[in-house]
Image (spheres, rainbow, N blue to C red):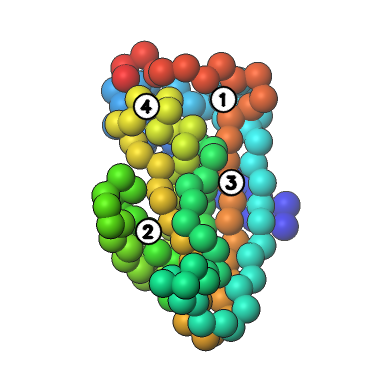
């Protein structure tokens, strides 16, 4: 588990470097000690029972939400269930499945990144819809250090 945590954090840092470049920041902007130098990173093992969801009745594996932090790395099995809403402000919301890809991470952007980037990056509204099959995933939530000052980034 420790090895997974360490390697997942390296993936998260690599993604943060891409985000920094996209925001016209120095490539190592998020590598600073007060940011991802000593991050808060939590690993959560998720199991969804083999039940069928009924969104019309409000029955889900996990209801619609966005994650709080900077990013979430999600490793999944090969069972469909994760849905995202690309425009969370749309009425009605349109949901689409994210195809599981063996050996790959799905990257959800968090509310913190949305606020930091002044909505240039939007957090990922997502939910899980059960299809009758058991489903497993591993969520790796990444947030900056407790001492990090959160304010609009200088380029945003």
The answer to whether marks 3 and 2 mark residues whose Cβ atoms lie closer than 8 Å is: no
- Which residue is disc 3 drawn over? 141
- What's the mark number on residue 108? none
- Which residue is disc 2 drawn over? 84
Q: Nearer the viewer, residue 14 or 148?
A: 148
Which comes before the other along the chain, label 3 or label 1?
Answer: 1
SS for dot 2:
strand
Local packing at callout 3 (Cα closer than 10 Å; few below 14, some 14-19, many 20+) is: many
Which comes before the other along the chain, label 4 or label 3?
Answer: 4
SS for dot 3:
strand
Q: Nearer the viewer, mark 4 or mark 1?
A: 4
Percent position (x, y) of residue 113? 44, 33
Mark-to-mark CA distance, 3 and 2: 17 Å
Percent position (x, y) of residue 151? 47, 17
The answer to whether marks 4 and 3 mark residues whose Cβ atoms lie closer than 8 Å is: no
Mark-to-mark CA distance, 4 and 3: 18 Å
Q: Horizontal placement of 94 versus 135: left or right?
A: left
- Which residue is disc 4 drawn over? 117
């Amino acid at each position: 588990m420790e090895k997974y945590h360490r390697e997942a954090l390296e993936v998260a840092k690599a993604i943060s470097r891409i985000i920094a470049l996209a925001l016209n920041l120095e490539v190592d902007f998020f590598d600073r000690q007060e940011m991802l130098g000593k991050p808060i990173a939590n690993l959560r093992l998720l199991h969804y029972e083999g039940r069928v969801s009924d969104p019309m009745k409000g029955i889900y594996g996990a209801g619609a939400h966005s994650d709080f932090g900077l990013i979430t790395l999600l490793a999944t099995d090969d069972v469909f269930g994760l849905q995202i809403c690309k425009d969370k402000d749309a009425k009605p919301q349109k949901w689409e499945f994210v195809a599981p890809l063996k050996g790959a991470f799905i990257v959800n952007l968090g509310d913190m990144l949305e606020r930091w980037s002044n909505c240039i990056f939007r957090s990922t509204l997502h939910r899980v819809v059960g299809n009758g099959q058991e489903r497993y995933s591993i969520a790796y939530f990444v947030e900056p250090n407790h001492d990090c000052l959160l304010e609009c980034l200088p380029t945003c």
